[in-house]
Image (spheres, grey):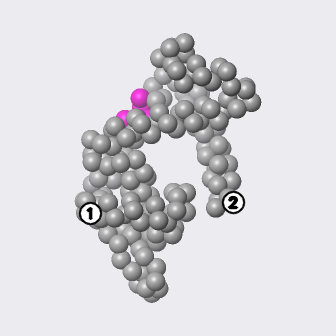
């Protein structure tokens, strides 16, 4: 899309230049979430559910609190997502073997299969996104995004 016809880019021209990074990240996040939502709908998932499924490893139960921390969301948000994934038979919830107060979550065999489909969706989007970049640009982008992600995660943890 041409910068002159993209309404999001047109609006950023009037913003102070010292917020270009935030403006770009917000636009990228919004567009990526919308794009991934369309792709996930094909496998009957909603955004966020993909990240939860990918975080889980086969035969390795994880506590709800660890999932919430890893995904940078509140435990109540994880619980709502889990309710929906349990209804679909993708995950199961149970008590910790020693500490019965802790709730543990693990993938079902069906969940493992859908998790593989999530990876396919992510690969498709990744290929679409990086297809126009050369190898050096991909490397620089990956390193830069990794640093920004780490910085945001650290600051977010301090605020919660």
Q: Main secondary structure of the magenta part?
A: helix
Residue shown at the point (52%, 38%) measured from the top left: 29
The residue at which mark 1 appears reads as 87
Q: Residue 71 at what x, y percent from top left? A: 51, 57
In the rendered image of this protein, does residue 52 appear above or below residue 23? below
Q: Residue at x 25, y 59 (%)?
A: 88
Looking at the rendering, the stretch of residues picked out in magenta corresponds to 124-128
Residue 155 as seen in the image, left or right of residue 65: right
- Picture quadrant of residue 95: bottom left
Q: Nearer the viewer, residue 55 or 10?
A: 10
Say which residue appears at 47% left-offset and 33% top-offset.
31
Q: As drawn, is 67 to the left or to the right of 111?
A: right
Percent x, y for residue 143? 62, 39
Point out the tag, 2 or 1, that comes first from the N-terminus: 1
| Residue picked out by circle 2 | 158
User: Would residue 127 be counted in the magenta stretch?
Assistant: yes
Structural distance between the alpha carbons of marks 2 and 1: 34 Å
| Residue occupying image coordinates x 58% and y 19% | 10
Report x, y in % for residue 160: 64, 61
Residue 52, image x, y percentages: 42, 57
Evaluate whether residue 28 shows in this view: yes
């Amino acid at each position: 899309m041409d910068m002159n016809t993209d309404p999001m880019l047109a609006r950023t021209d009037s913003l102070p230049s010292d917020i270009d990074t935030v403006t770009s990240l917000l636009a990228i996040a919004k567009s990526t979430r919308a794009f991934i939502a369309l792709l996930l709908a094909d496998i009957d998932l909603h955004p966020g559910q993909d990240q939860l499924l990918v975080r889980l490893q086969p035969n390795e139960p994880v506590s709800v609190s660890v999932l919430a921390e890893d995904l940078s969301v509140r435990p109540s948000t994880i619980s709502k997502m889990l309710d929906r994934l349990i209804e679909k038979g993708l995950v199961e919830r149970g008590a910790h073997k020693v500490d019965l107060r802790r709730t543990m979550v693990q993938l079902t065999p069906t969940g493992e299969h859908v998790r593989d489909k999530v990876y396919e969706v992510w690969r498709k989007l990744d290929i679409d996104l990086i297809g126009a970049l050369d190898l050096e640009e991909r490397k620089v982008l990956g390193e830069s995004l990794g640093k920004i992600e780490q910085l945001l995660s650290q600051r977010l943890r301090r605020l919660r």
